[in-house]
Image (spheres, rainbow, N blue to C red):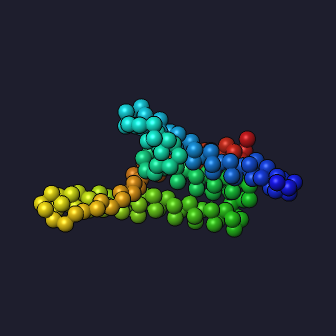
Amino acid sequence: MGNTAKLQLHLLMTSPVFLSAIFSWLSAQLIKTLIRLVSGRVSSLKELFELLFWKTGSMPSSHCALVVALATSIGYRSGIHSDIFILACCFALVVVRDAVGVRRSSGIQAKVINEIGFVLSKKEMPDFKPVKEVQGHKPLEVIIGSLLGFFIGTAFSIL
């Protein structure tokens, strides 16, 4: 790796914008995992790792934490009048709306479709293949994730 590439990597890894986004996502995933662990809803080590790094849904929203931290830290660094901050805010609004609206609705619909399919398959109807149930978020999960992102974005920007 050349000196220019090393410098670019160093600048990325020390960027408050990058760090706030990554740290907020990891923090939300950790909180989500701890909540599931404490409530006894983790059944295997594989599920624990999926929760930590990949699983969506539940409290708090890691998607919302990430995009709000991103917009917040960009606002601090570039100013709330900047084009990049406005872009980040619009991006955050799309993600937040998707988390609480579209993904939640499609997840509820998928669950009902699966329930109907299983009932019909028991009545000797054609074999039913369940559809994927994508978990969206309840409004409180989005609010908590967004607050987490705002505070982490602020912390990385002013400290």
Q: Which quadrant would residue 132 be assigned to in this image? A: bottom left
77 displayed left or right of 88: right
Q: Is residue 144 above or below residue 110?
A: above
Q: Which quadrant would residue 47 be assigned to in this image? A: top left
Residue for point 63% across, 57% down:
71
2 displayed left or right of 156: right
Q: Which quadrant would residue 86 be assigned to in this image? A: bottom right
Residue for point 39% across, 52% down:
138
In front of the other: 56 or 150: 56
How many numbered marks have been drawn onto this rendered protein structure?
0
126 displayed left or right of 132: left
Most distant residue in the left direction = 123
Residue for point 22% across, 63% down:
127
Q: Is residue 11 visible?
A: no
In front of the other: 47 or 136: 47
In the rendered image, which quarter contains the C terminus? top right
x%, y% of residue 121?
Answer: 18, 60
In the rendered image, which quarter contains the N terminus? bottom right
Q: Is residue 117 visible?
A: yes
Residue for point 87% across, 54% down:
3
x%, y% of residue 18?
Answer: 69, 52
x%, y% of residue 117?
Answer: 22, 61
94 displayed left or right of 112: right
x%, y% of residue 104?
Answer: 38, 58
